[in-house]
């Protein structure tokens, strides 16, 4: 598999690493050897950046030894060995060391690659409180009188105003700061991010005390989120002096507030952590969040101070390099049970609150809803039940109607009846077949003459008749019609224009994808949101195959139509929707992410304690179903989305309303997306 598709760098990712070498105090040669060994290992794994701790060449705990010439000379010699070794290390190495510049000593981050020192960044903020006395030995970056120095027969950029641009990877621009720099109210990395840095690196020593590990997580996570960047955090481990302090060697990699990798703490040996950072995602987030550019303008004087230093960094594209990153198979459904419960609780309450407000503001106390015995209408009914409870209205104010047609199965009809009973709504049953037969006769449809012609007209007559009944029943009872169609159906255009799942007075499900609705229904059952009864019928609904039930079956009791056989598995299409809508990724990248998540059921995380089928898909199936999604989403369905009813938005990038996250022309083409998809191999 040498095709570029199978290499993470092809799709806007970059593998980065943080090293925590075992050190010896005041032994730069030993420390350099440990650093080189870890750097070689990181590069062999495909990493293009590897960062090491603050003052790692000397050790952080040298105190007044930093003013000894022998130690400073040895540190420069150790740096020279790293520079020489970098000729054979296909990664950029960032190391910490003390460095003399014009009779002044600085605590520095040194950027090394391809046999050269590319730039040197001195520490901006020196802690001089509690157990730290750095101002005793070092000067702050602002005290530097020069912006370059001569080192190893080369002029090297020097200053806290450096950002480094990878020449072969346009989206990779990185910045280094040192320990305390990120603890201040406005870290230097904030301005570096505004100057284009997508990867922020902190060379820290950071002793450990009770509670500090958790605070580091908060600090680093928030800085990465605020800057829409990746943040690599290093800290010193085994070997630092324990005269007064202890060291845990905690290394972290965050991306936009999400933890990608963390080292085990208190290890005895040198170690590395890796993460594959999605540079394209970070770029897209900055593009989407227009206030980021506004901040650039607001702080233009600070941003203008930065110097961009080109660094010849080449992505290792000569081999397959699979993604070393957790890609959730169900991006709308957290794998962790606790987070999944939190998600379901929040989504359910957003839906309920939306409906409560609509009923309150319109001074309407009744709702009309069609119940099919399937998944979507079941969940919408559960939302209605909780809304009535919140409004202190009887559930009998829910006027629920099941309307069997030509293809309604006994299973779904019985489920609809039982569901309405356990909810306690006002239940009705209307056989729509006589009305549909009259409509088909009026149309002169072949079915009215006894022919088994089950075309789109035959299907839509049934969908339209149900909707006609619901709206007239709402008029008659001074109620509003509650929609049941979900986000996945809107994305794929799997609804009949103007009727059926498309139209209502208020749609509680419109921004909830099918995969999440499944878990919502199960969560409502398990947490007894609408009472102690009904668990069995909800479980039966969850195990029912998804079907519109509009075409009669040739076999009694058999469901003829299978929705997913036409539009593809919802678990794949929801995956495609998330990365297309939320991030605007190219089809090849969506396919790469999907392949990473779905090609092997034995790898990656599945939702814990959730009853999901553990499917896997070959690349050919992933490509085929993505093609279905792209054509339906970009070419066939926008005219339906352009006029959808009001509905509460439940998630970021999770609405297809023209008043929300997605505005698009109704007559666009899918050509460019399908052409880009064609670059994906079949296997």
Image (tube, grey):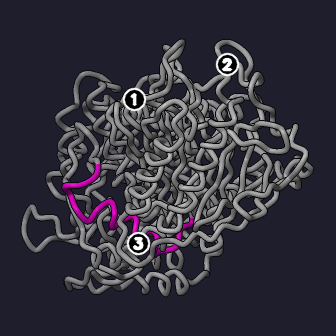
Measured as percent of width and height from the top left, residue 527 is found at: 30, 25
Q: As drawn, which residue projects farthest toward the front?
A: 70
Q: Nearer the viewer, mark 2 or mark 3?
A: 2
Task: Quote the CA–CA distance across marks 2 and 3.
Answer: 45 Å
Q: Front-most of 516 and 295?
A: 295
Q: Front-most of 150 and 207?
A: 150
Residue marked by disc 3? 7
Q: Front-most of 516 and 84?
A: 84
Q: Is residue 384 above or below residue 326?
A: above
Indicate left or right for 479 with 134 as reference: left
Indicate left or right for 165 with 84 as reference: right
**Of the image marks 3 and 1, the number of the one nearer the N terminus:** 3
Residue marked by disc 2? 132
Q: Is residue 11 above or below residue 604?
A: below
Residue 45 is at least partly visible in this image:
yes
Quick one: SS at disc 3? loop
Measured as percent of width and height from the top left, residue 493 is found at: 46, 69
Quick one: SS at disc 1? loop
* Residue 602 painted magenta: yes
* Residue 75 painted magenta: no
Q: Which mark is residue 265?
A: 1
Residue at the image point whose x is 50% and y is 51% from the top: 511
Task: Quote the CA–CA distance across marks 1 and 2.
Answer: 22 Å
Asked if disc 3 and disc 1 are in contact, CB closer than 8 Å, the reply is no
Indicate left or right for 40 with 14 as reference: left
Task: Quote the CA–CA distance across marks 3 and 1.
Answer: 31 Å
Q: Which mark is residue 405?
A: none
**Of the image marks 2 and 3, the number of the one nearer the N terminus:** 3
Measured as percent of width and height from the top left, residue 603 is found at: 24, 54
Q: Which residues are magenta?
A: 584-604
Residue 439 is at least partly visible in this image:
no
Measured as percent of width and height from the top left, residue 355 is found at: 54, 36
């Amino acid at each position: 598999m040498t095709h570029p598709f199978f290499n993470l760098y092809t799709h806007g990712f970059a593998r980065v690493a943080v090293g925590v070498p075992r050190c010896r105090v005041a032994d730069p040669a030993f420390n350099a050897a440990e650093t080189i060994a870890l750097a070689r290992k990181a590069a062999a794994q495909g990493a293009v950046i590897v960062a090491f701790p603050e003052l790692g060449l000397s050790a952080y705990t040298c105190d007044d030894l930093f003013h000894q010439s022998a130690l400073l000379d040895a540190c420069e010699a150790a740096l020279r060995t790293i520079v020489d070794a970098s000729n054979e290390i296909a990664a950029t190495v960032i190391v910490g060391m003390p460095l003399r510049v014009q009779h002044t000593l600085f605590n520095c981050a040194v950027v090394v690659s391809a046999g050269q020192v590319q730039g040197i960044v001195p520490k901006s903020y020196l802690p001089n409180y509690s157990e730290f006395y750095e101002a005793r030995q070092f000067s702050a970056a602002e005290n530097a009188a020069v912006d370059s120095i001569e080192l190893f027969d080369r002029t090297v950029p020097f200053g806290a105003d450096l950002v480094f641009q990878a020449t072969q990877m346009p989206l990779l621009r990185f910045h280094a700061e040192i320990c305390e720099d990120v603890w201040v109210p406005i870290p230097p990395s904030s301005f570096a991010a505004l100057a284009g840095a997508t990867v922020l690196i902190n060379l820290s020593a950071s002793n450990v005390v009770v509670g500090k590990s958790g605070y580091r997580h908060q600090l680093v996570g928030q800085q990465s989120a605020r800057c829409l960047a990746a943040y690599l955090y290093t800290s010193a481990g085994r070997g630092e002096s324990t005269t007064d302090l202890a060291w845990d060697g905690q290394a972290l990699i965050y991306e936009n507030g999400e933890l990608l990798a963390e080292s085990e703490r208190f290890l005895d040996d040198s170690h590395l952590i890796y993460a594959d950072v999605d540079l394209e995602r970070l770029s897209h987030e900055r593009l989407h969040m227009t206030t980021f550019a506004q901040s650039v303008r607001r702080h233009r004087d600070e941003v203008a101070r930065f110097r961009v230093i080109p660094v010849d960094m080449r992505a290792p594209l000569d081999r397959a390099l699979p993604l070393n990153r957790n890609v959730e198979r169900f991006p709308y459904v957290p794998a962790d049970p606790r987070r999944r419960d939190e998600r379901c609780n929040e989504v359910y309450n957003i839906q309920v609150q939306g409906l409560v407000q609509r009923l309150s503001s319109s001074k309407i106390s009744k709702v009309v809803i069609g119940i099919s015995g399937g998944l979507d209408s079941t969940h919408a009914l559960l939302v209605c039940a909780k809304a009535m409870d919140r409004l202190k209205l009887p559930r009998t104010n829910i006027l629920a109607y099941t309307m069997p047609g030509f293809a309604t199965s006994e299973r779904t009809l019985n489920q609809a009846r039982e569901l309405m009973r356990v909810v306690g709504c006002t239940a009705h049953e209307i056989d729509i077949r006589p009305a549909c037969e009259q409509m088909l006769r009026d149309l002169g449809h072949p079915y009215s003459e006894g022919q088994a012609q089950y075309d789109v007209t035959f299907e839509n007559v049934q969908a339209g008749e149900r909707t006609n009944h619901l709206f007239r029943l709402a008029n008659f009872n001074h109620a509003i019609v509650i929609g049941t169609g979900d986000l996945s159906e809107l994305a794929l255009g799997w609804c009949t224009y103007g009727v059926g799942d498309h139209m209502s007075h208020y749609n509680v499900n419109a921004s909830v994808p099918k995969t999440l609705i499944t878990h919502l229904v199960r969560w409502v059952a398990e947490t007894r949101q609408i009472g102690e009864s009904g668990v069995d019928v909800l479980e039966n609904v969850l195990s029912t195959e998804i079907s519109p039930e509009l075409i009669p079956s040739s076999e009694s009791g058999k469901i003829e139509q299978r929705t997913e056989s036409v539009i593809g598995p919802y678990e794949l299409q929801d995956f495609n929707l998330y990365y297309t809508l939320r991030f605007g990724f190219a089809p090849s990248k969506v396919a790469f992410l999907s392949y990473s998540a779905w090609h092997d059921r034995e790898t990656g995380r599945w939702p814990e304690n959730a009853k999901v089928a553990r499917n896997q898909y070959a690349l050919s199936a992933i490509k085929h179903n993505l093609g279905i999604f792209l054509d339906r989403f970009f070419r066939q369905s926008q005219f339906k989305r352009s006029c959808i009813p009001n509905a509460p938005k439940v998630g970021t990038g999770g609405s297809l309303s023209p008043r929300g996250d997605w505005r698009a022309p109704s007559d666009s083409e899918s050509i460019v997306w399908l052409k880009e998809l064609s670059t994906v191999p079949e296997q």
